[in-house]
Amino acid sequence: MAALITGIHHITAIAGNPQKNIDFYTGILGLRMVKKTINFDAPDVYHFYFGDELGTPGTVFTTFPFEGARKGTKGTGELTYTAFSVPESSLAFWIERLAKFNIPTSTPLSRFGDKIIRFEDHDGMGIELVANNKDSRKGWIGGNIGKENAIKGFFGATLMLKSKDLTEKLLTEFMDYRFIAYENGRFRYGTAGNPGDIIDIVIDQNGRQGIQSAGTVHHIAFRTANESSQKEIQKILINNGYHVTEVKDRNYFKSIYFREPGGVLFEIATDEPGFAIDEDEAHLGEALKLPDWAEPQREKIESRLAKVTLNSSTYE
């Protein structure tokens, strides 16, 4: 039987200033803005999608930028670090590049045989770059980062929890994940064990609960092929006691949501139909795209959104 879940689809964070958010992820990290739309549940807030050339599932980091939002705090019940995959020989480039923009990084760390660096964006969002030779994706090379250094997509994500047993059961019994390895207090899981499907769990039994606001992750979405496979996983989860939402139409994918036992908001999102359904591939992310139900309110919505520009060339 084919796996219903095949890895990470996207990760969504809360941010502060929208222009700083664009500048960091497109200008400094070199991701492509593949969609500029609104938070469907809060239409006066942007929803930005950053990823590879087409916003391929497994590459897309998304943000809800709330102007003036206070900074959140990392803690238990949260996804604390989002890890991106980069070429094996690129860490020196990234350390130098981040220093150029006054972004401090950790010294290179070793984890499960890979070298990584850790840092935070302007809002305090936890980011890791994992250098490895296992990733054949090319990432976005149409921006200001060459292919020898470009971010390829997600490597994985770290969940900080007070206990792991019930979350592990969810992942391994109902979500097509398997336990891979343990190292230095970190439990690793994957669907195939490749970049883009890795979930690490770190336990802090006495840790403080994280406070969600700017610089913290709102939710993590896992990939499923289509609406049919999504309905199957929805049924499995409901039958095993998880409180799962109805299917929500997010235009570029369909979604269901539920909280895993440790408190992190999980989403299951379809690979279909993708981000090119309402824009030419060459111009993804350039115009504000609205769902059909919001189009009659475009003038009102645009008046409430801050003006932003794509100017990643400033960061070459």
Image: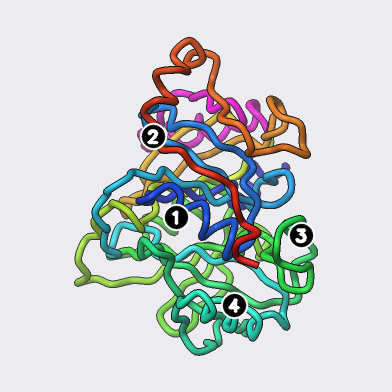
Of the 4 image quadrants, the one containing the N terminus is top right
Per the image, label 4 sits on a secondary structure element best described as: helix
**Which residue is painted at 44% across and 25% down in the image?**
302
Question: In screen coordinates, is 192 left or right of 67?
Answer: right
Mark toward the start of the polypeptide (2 vs 1) = 1
* Residue designated by label 2: 45
Query: Badge 4 is on which residue?
Result: 97
Residue type at tag 2: Val
Q: Which mark is residue 20?
A: 1
Residue drawn at the location 32% of the way across and 63% of the way down: 161
- In the displayed structure, 67 sits above or below 305; it is below
Q: Is residue 233 magenta?
A: yes
First in sequence: mark 4 vs mark 1: 1
Stretch of the chain drawn in magenta: 226-252
Question: For the residues marked 2 and 1, what is the alpha-carbon distance in whole angstroms?
Answer: 15 Å
Chain-order first, disc 3 or disc 2: 2
16 and 181: which is toward the camera: 16
Task: Check disc 3 and report the residue beneath it.
Answer: 141
Q: What kind of residue is marked 4?
A: Arg
Q: Identify which amino acid the numbered label 1 is placed on.
A: Lys
